Image (tube, helix red, strand yellow):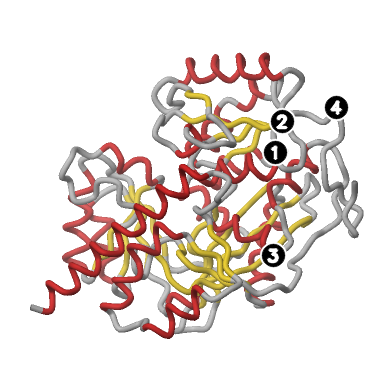
Amino acid sequence: MTSPAGNPTRADAGWPSAVIAGAFQTGVLGVRSLQRRGVRAVMFDCTGGMPGFRSIYGPARLCPDPDYKPAEWLAFMLDLSRELGGKPILIASSDRFVTAIYRHRDVLAAHFTLSPGVTLQGLFAEKQSQYELAEKHGMPMPLTRFVAGEAQVVEFGRTAMYPCLIKPGHFREWEKFPAGHPLLRQKVSICGSAAELLANYRLAAALTPSVILQEIIEGPDTAKRVYLSVYDSNSRRIANALFLEWRCDPFGFGPATVTVPVVDPEADAVCDAWLRSVGYAGICEIEVKRDTRDGKVKLIEANPRLSGGGDAAPHNGVDLCWLHYCDMAGRRVEPVGPDGRYFKHIVLRAEGAAIPNYWRAGLIGWRDLFTTYQPRVAFFDLDWRDIRYSLETLYVTARMLFSGIWRNLRSRK
């Protein structure tokens, strides 16, 4: 079967199986996309608590952690390839596995079909090399410095516009802090002054003396755009969609909790030009924001994998995972863009935390909530075929929502 654009809509007999690296909900949705189109698809993860281990689209396979047991992880991968037969198509849905696939690409290539962009994806997964590629190829971004000592922090602090932020080269680095550490599992630390910047660097330096310092892109959350795409081996764009952020969690700096389709030719062109310039191939999500100080669209970060925001694209007629799979399976894919339908894409669990924060800041009211949840809506973490996870989502969302409301009420007293 083919779509009006001439692209396949289902896998034929003999098409390769697929392996999704990562069993967070992002990976579950990748498996769901492929299974619905007749592909034998499985997923794996090194964290047994991920949704994929309880999903009807799984269960996921438990693997060694590639960061700590690389040889054992590679042995697991080779066993999985033999079990599935042929050369399964390998698609990452987690930064951890983007990096692992990149590090072991020479061995894995004999057993799996890898994206032709695996090397660039590995470079994009590390913030320092990602920002270096952005600077080299003309992708606008805020003032950014890579520092490895207090003197460099002080130098940056003298000229930076505040607030600014400090973050590790990869967020997993701060997962290694001991319990109770202020930076444990934080992706960024926001600093309002040079003194605060230096103090936060000292907190980080015991574990990560090399960090990234960056000015914040000024503007409301609604100035943020999420660019979703797939490029083939010739860096030809074969899929694209663009969304506007309504809300995010954490407030002001986190991943989007609600997005809607948007037409923004400048943001689309800036992101597309950068990926073409570096010769990118594969799936990529780019978060950008228009800076209210100079009006420029600037890079926040790029994610070279399946992403939570990417789940919005299929509801806009652009099934990123399927189109990427078809391309990697050797089928020519004609470019697919948004179908023009309007809807709200909602990450319900994160919304439970975001709504009380936005309400407390006076940025939303009852009318905004009513508008958000009016049809047409699509949910990242609600799928009634996957009933166990959906019920868990409702419970977690309610708990986060009422906890936030209670905190708001107490703060008024």
Q: Quadrant of residue 208?
A: top left
- Disc number at residue 91? none
Whichever of callouts 2 and 3 sits on the residue coming sooner in the sequence is 2
> In the visual, does 32 lie left or right of 141?
right
Q: Are marks 2 and 1 in contact (CB under 8 Å)?
A: yes
Instruction: Report which residue position mark 1 lands on.
Output: 35
- Disc number at residue 40? 2
Whichever of callouts 3 and 4 sits on the residue coming sooner in the sequence is 4
Whichever of callouts 1 and 3 sits on the residue coming sooner in the sequence is 1
Instruction: Report which residue position mark 4 lands on.
Output: 14
Calculate the distance from the C-alpha at mark 2 to the C-alpha at mark 3.
Answer: 24 Å
Whichever of callouts 2 and 1 sits on the residue coming sooner in the sequence is 1
Calculate the distance from the C-alpha at mark 2 to the C-alpha at mark 1.
Answer: 6 Å
Residue 60: x and y in percent read 53, 29
Q: Foreground mark, 4 or 1? A: 1
Task: Bin the neighbour count of mark 2 within 10 Å (Cα to Cα): few under 14, some 14-19, many 20 and up.
Answer: some
Calculate the distance from the C-alpha at mark 4 to the C-alpha at mark 1.
Answer: 15 Å
The residue depicted at 49 percent of the width and 83 percent of the height is: 294
User: Type of residue at label 2?
Assistant: Arg
Calculate the distance from the C-alpha at mark 2 to the C-alpha at mark 4.
Answer: 10 Å
Element type at mark 2: loop
Calculate the distance from the C-alpha at mark 3 to the C-alpha at mark 4.
Answer: 29 Å
Instruction: Report which residue position mark 3 lands on.
Output: 316
Looking at the picture, does residue 174 appear above or below residue 139?
above
User: Type of residue at label 1?
Assistant: Gln
Element type at mark 3: helix
Note whether residue 304 is visible.
no
Whichever of callouts 2 and 4 sits on the residue coming sooner in the sequence is 4
